[in-house]
Image (cartoon, rainbow, N blue to C red):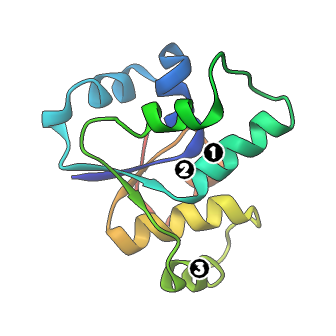
């Protein structure tokens, strides 16, 4: 099975794994349990915005942190393609209007993957599979 990491799941795995559910920690710590991990290209941007706003802090350069965080086993960075960009704006309704969440959900739908997320708005959305 393929999984798309929501931005917070990617950040927490690399900074504070205890914030993840036990199920997610078990999955991520055992690469043989998944075919592939996906990360939308929007997630490093969202991480950078959190740094810019002072909502998170790191003890190394942002480029170094991102590079190390992208080194997860079986992780593939999914570009924001024109198709995903369009599909993020035409998701079956109702879905909330956070553009980053729309892109992550559209990425999961395009890749036929399950979203790893704690976000209730995504978990309650019936048009994408989630895992927490």
Label 3: how many Cα within 10 Å (few below 14, some 14–19, many 20+)? some
Give the quarter of the image for residue 2: bottom left
Q: In this figure, which residue is indicated by the disc labeled 3?
A: 85
Which one is nearer the viewer's eye here, 125 or 99?
Answer: 99
Distance, label 2 to label 3, CA atoms, is: 21 Å
- Residue 114 appears in the picture as rendered: yes
Tell me: residue 83, above or below residue 22: below
Tell me, for residue 51, which label it has, or none: none
Tell me: residue 12, above or below residue 92: above
> How many badges with numbers are in the image?
3
Rendering coords of residue 28 (x, y %): 31, 30
Give the quarter of the image for residue 23: top left
44 sits left or right of 79 in the view = right
Distance, label 3 to label 1, CA atoms, is: 22 Å
The residue at 59%/79% (across/down) is 85
Q: Secondary structure at mark 1?
A: helix
Rendering coords of residue 30 (x, y %): 20, 27
The residue at 62%/43% (across/down) is 119
Q: Secondary structure at mark 2?
A: helix
Q: Are marks 1 and 2 in contact (CB under 8 Å)?
A: yes
Q: Secondary structure at mark 3?
A: helix
Q: In this figure, which residue is indicated by the disc labeled 2?
A: 123
Considering every residue shown, the one lying at the far right of the view is: 53
Q: Are marks 2 and 3 in contact (CB under 8 Å)?
A: no
Tell me: residue 113, above or below residue 127: above
Q: Nearer the viewer, mark 3 or mark 1?
A: 3
59 sits left or right of 49 in the view = left
Rendering coords of residue 46 (x, y %): 68, 48
- Ranked by sequence position, the earlier of labels 3 and 1 is 3
Tell me, for residue 120, which label it has, or none: 1
């Amino acid at each position: 099975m393929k999984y798309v990491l929501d931005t917070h799941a990617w950040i927490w795995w690399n900074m504070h794994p205890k914030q993840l559910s036990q199920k997610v920690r078990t999955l991520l710590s055992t690469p043989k349990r998944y075919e592939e991990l996906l990360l939308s290209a929007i997630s490093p941007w969202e991480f950078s915005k959190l740094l810019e706003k002072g909502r998170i802090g790191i003890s190394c350069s942002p480029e170094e942190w991102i590079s190390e965080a992208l080194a997860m086993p079986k992780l593939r960075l999914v570009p924001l393609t024109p198709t995903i960009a369009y599909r993020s704006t035409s998701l079956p309704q109702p879905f909330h209007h956070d553009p980053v969440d729309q892109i992550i959900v559209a990425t999961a739908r395009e890749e036929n993957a399950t979203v790893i997320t704690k976000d209730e708005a995504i978990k309650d959305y019936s048009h994408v599979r989630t895992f927490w």
